[in-house]
Amino acid sequence: MSDTQEKPGLMSRPIPAPMVSVETKPFWDAAAEGRFLIGRCHDCGKAYWYPRNTCPHCMSGDTSLEESPGEGVIYTYSVMYRSPTGPYAIGYVTLNEGPAVLTNFVDVAPDGLSIGMKVKVKFQPTEGGPPAPVFAPA
Amino acid sequence: MSIKGQAYLMGAFEHPLRDAPDTSTAQLHAECARGALADAGLSYLDIDGYFCAGDAPGFGGMSMADYMGLRNVRHMDTTETGGSSYIVHVGHAAQAIAAGKCSVALITLAGRPRHGGRRPGAGMAGGAGGSGLSDGPPEAGFENIYGGSTHNTYGMCAMRHMYEYGTTSEQLAWIKVAASTHAQWNEHAFLRDVVTVEDVVNSRMIADPLHLLDCCVVTDGGGALIVTSPEVAKSLKRPKVRVLGAGEAPKLPLGGLDLDLTHSGAVWSGPRAFAEAGVTPGDIKYASIYDSFTITVLMQLEDLGFCKKGEGGRFVSDGNLISGVGKLPFNTDGGGLCNNHPTNRGGITKVIEAVRQLRGEAHPKVQVANCDLAIAHGTGGSLGTRHCAATVILEREG
């Protein structure tokens, strides 16, 4: 249970264990240490999300994961009310490095979200898996 | 017409690994693709056709095209026939090339059965996560855990569209009003009550800003189509509906730079279909437009060119989509919003109602006068993540 669930009115949501592959294990190992990694291509130099071995900008295989502060602004969101665990927010964050990240917004009331709001990553325990990145108001 | 001499095999690559403990299935696909491209002397930007089968992780061909960054794909084929799939794909690629649907087709196969990679053909849509180092859709760990459904991922699109263009819930509601106005005449429609703008905006919120009545119905059922040669068509006793043009286009996040959720793949599939048909949006008498949600319709109408980007809200208002009232009669069966959305896949019902309109066999209360040209358009997947848009232009002959 995250501590946010004890604050009335603030959204939270139980997160299932993420699927971890041999390709994405380094990301999830870093997540367990509280570090947020994004993809970076050494050929075209661009950052990308979601983490993978192949650069989705130029198809190069010369890539690595790099640590990101996980800061950005909300590109869009939707608060889901048809939920047995209470309302929750899904949306995209545009990271300062450029890529948009699909995520849940936490520690914020349903009417407290807005496009352009500054947010920062934090890690939330999952149900039997490594912690997952979610975003909260910065 | 034959494919004889119409296509060439110019790149081939066999992955050197026979045991891949440290390489994911998606990565193997990409490495094979890079190998074949290098062999041919071509770039990933040249690829405009992508072919894969059940071994490709993810949703149809879309997950792998997105993983690899294939941004120019205008033809996809995921025919699954087991181990012969890739030979089938060569034939299909040649047909597509001969028809001008693509010019550089990529066919990939990869898997890792020695390391618990899921068996080919175990389902194309992928699972919802899970523990262990099994291969799944490459994006699954980063997307499937956040409670994304069609409702809230389309809600994200509506939210951004409202932010950028000032689109309102009342404007979206007019789309449902039009569908319900048509559905009242369809004895098979799941919902036959005519609703008002107020009914829609006062219905309970499902996924902000989409209300219950912004959402399509959930129905069982199905449909089928028969497509024939001109010779067979001539021999039959039914009115002839001719296929004039078709276009398709995946829209993929491609690493997440410059994400724009205010448009769909229809911005590419539509112009391709119109160009092949030799007609323009202004010529269309009836439009079947995929209506999983009201926002789906609004975005696609803009993207297909029925109005300018951002003006969809005004375009759909005041009954403009109602047969006999507005300028662009749409979904006269009641659409997915009221009539039917069999097994959460609305594409086939879009074609079926277009056929009825072109034959003059729609309900008399919604039949479009002199309906000789129609469009059937849909998007599959999610407008909020990755989807494929498909457009066909149909004409009544004679």
Image: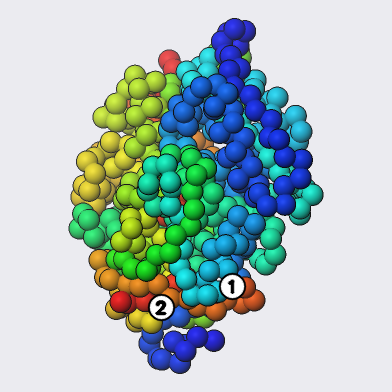
How far is the residue under mark 1 from the one under mark 2? 18 Å
For disc 2, the chain is A
In the rendered image, the quadrant that contains the C terminus of chain B is: top left
Q: Residue at the spot x=76%, y=40% of the render?
A: B18
Q: Position of residue A2 (x, y in %)?
A: 50, 85
The crowd level at tag 2 (other Cα within 10 Å; few <14, some 14-19, many 20+) is many
* Helix, strand or loop under label 1: loop
State which mark lies toward you, 1 or 2: 1
Label disc, if present, on residue A106 of the rendered structure: 2
Q: Position of residue B270 (x, y in %)?
A: 37, 33
- The amino acid sitting under disc 2 is Val
In the rendered image, the quadrant that contains the N terminus of chain B is: top right
As drawn, the residue found furthest toward the right would be B114
Q: Earlier in the sequence, mark 1 or mark 2?
A: 2
Position of B72 with respect to B145 (left or right) is left
Q: Residue at the spot x=65%, y=50% of the render?
A: B24
Up/down of B84 relative to A93, above or below: above
For disc 1, the chain is A
Q: Position of residue B155 (x, y in %)?
A: 38, 61
Report which residue position mark 1 lands on: A130
